[in-house]
Amino acid sequence: MIDVNRLPSVVRQHIAALRAILIFTVVCGIIYPVVMVGVAQLAFRHQANGSLVTYNGKVVGSSLICQEFVDSQGNPLPQYFQPRPSNATSGARNDYGCDPGYSGASNLGPNNPTLLKEIRQRQAQIAAFDHVPVSAIPPDAVTASGSGLDPDISPQYADIQVARVAAARHLPVSKVQALVNQYTQGRNLGFLGEPRVDVLTLNIALDELSAKSGT
């Protein structure tokens, strides 16, 4: 056996460094990830697996990522609540936003003329689609989130869509509004963030309500 203490100091330092690399590789690269995955699967299985949402036994999305509710031409479907605009798109045909592979913001400042033009266009489209005055349209309805994948909208944006969704589904406005209220989440811990409505879970609840009502 080699007496390490008799080796040159440079060699001893390299051996000590190699030992440290091996130890930290095992601890940080194998043991720690395995323990964290195990704890996550035991205590937070739903969140660790992507907060997936199922409907009729099939995975239809994630409560953490927005979805576009549009037809094949990219036109919003009136029977569904619509998410906020999304810049997460490849620009390809039939890719209208909420694409996890292209998450990102427009990087346009609040005074950028391109952004201001887009906002005015979106305001006009929403005003015509939901039959509301421009003054009633909240900011999140015409601006994308930083990631482009925000699954939530403000209760105010949900509220201006209620009448349109109820008419498209032949449901009482009161029932649709009650569903919005039911799926409105408050601030985290009572003070973090803003109240919000998850569009995907709300639309699934709408489908279930329509199925029960036979509409």
Image (cartoon, rainbow, N blue to C red):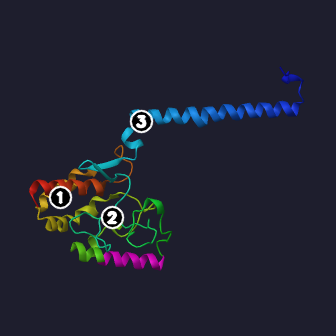
Q: Is residue 205 visible?
A: yes
Q: Main secondary structure of the magenta part?
A: helix
Which residue is at the front of the view, 152 or 54?
54
Quadrant location of residue 162? Answer: bottom left
* Residue linked to disc 1: 177
Quadrant location of residue 40? Answer: top left
**Left or right: 29 as drawn, with respect to 133:** right
How many marks can you see?
3
Q: Which residues are magenta?
A: 112-124
Location of the C terminus (image quadrant): bottom left
* Residue linked to disc 2: 68
Which residue is at the front of the view, 136 or 3?
3
The tag on residue 32 is none
Question: Circle 3 — which element?
Answer: helix
121 part of magenta stretch? yes
Task: Identify the mark nearer the N-term, 3 or 1.
Answer: 3
What amino acid does circle 1 point to? Gln
Q: Is residue 186 visible?
A: no
